[in-house]
Amino acid sequence: APRYTVCPCTHMGKQYIAVHLFTYDVLAPFEKGLQDYAIEHLRKKQGVQIHLGAMVTQVEEGALHVKHGGSTSYIKYGTMVWCAGIKPQKFVQDYDCPMDESGRFILVDSSLRVVGDPDVFAIGDCATIEDNRLPQTAQVASQQGAHVAKLLNKGDDAAFKFENRGAMAYLGGFTALAGNVPVVGTITGFIGFAAWRTTYWFMQLSMRNRFMLSVDWTRTLIFGRDLTRFGYRSQID
């Protein structure tokens, strides 16, 4: 579902900025306890005004119109950020492959072969398994890629089995959360932040990348996030 974040002021300084989040839900893939934790953190610690179940019906210059339940309202803004869901590139639909009921994803069998064409594989966000839809995450795509590589090397038809290794979300500052983590279950707060950073540090492909990432994190901790930008100002076509 689309999410709209608006800031009704354009002054530079946190004391002049109010952030409103209009969304149907927050962190839908996570369990309800972690969703509630994230909402409370964003509201109390980050000062975000969250409007759950809200639907933006119209956007115009300087204001947007919102429907919440049976009532409608509008809010003025200085900056608006629209976050939408992901979908495959349009060229995926041009291959005449069998598609799911929405017409957006290539339909594959349990071994990730395109239905009706066993010589073609489709993985990641462009495909969905017949009768077994999985979340569109990097974790799923990574495991699917490894599975297809194994099939090509061994030449068998083993079914793909997704192994949920947990999910993480960064909430700002030194706070993050993780769900479905093996052994421990859920992690929140600073421990969740440390786990989030550690996980992504080990996921780097080389010690050079890990070193550069550590330097970048340390520099940001000491001097703050680098907002320097070179080049021309972005323009909307």
Image (cartoon, rainbow, N blue to C red):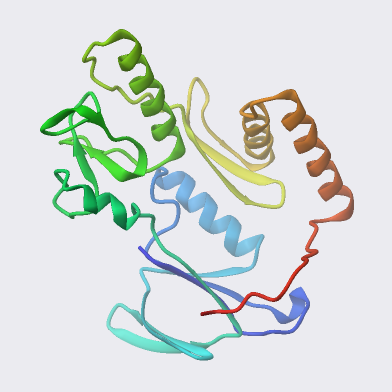
Q: Residue 109 versus residue 135: which sits nearer the camera?
A: 109
Say above or below: 222 vs 130: below
- Quarter of image, res 129: top left
Indicate the position of residue 120 as horizontal and vertical percent values. 23, 30
Give me the residue at 59% from left, 60% from top.
42
Q: Residue 59 versus residue 48: which sits nearer the camera?
A: 59
The answer to whether 4 appears left or right of 216 in the picture is: left
Furthest residue toward left: 116
Indicate the position of residue 87 as horizontal and vertical percent values. 34, 54
Report the quarter where the N terminus lies: bottom left
The answer to whether 69 appears left or right of 184 in the picture is: left
Indicate the position of residue 36 as horizontal and vertical percent values. 47, 52
Say above or below: 61 vs 121: below
Q: Residue 81 versus residue 50: which sits nearer the camera?
A: 81
Say above or below: 172 vs 147: below
Q: Residue 3 versus residue 51: which sits nearer the camera?
A: 3
Say above or below: 204 vs 78: above
- Quarter of image, res 43: bottom right
The answer to whether 59 appears left or right of 237 in the picture is: left
Furthest residue toward top: 154
Give me the residue at 42% from left, 41% from top.
137
Give me the residue at 41% from left, 63% from top.
84
The answer to whether 69 appears left or right of 38 in the picture is: left
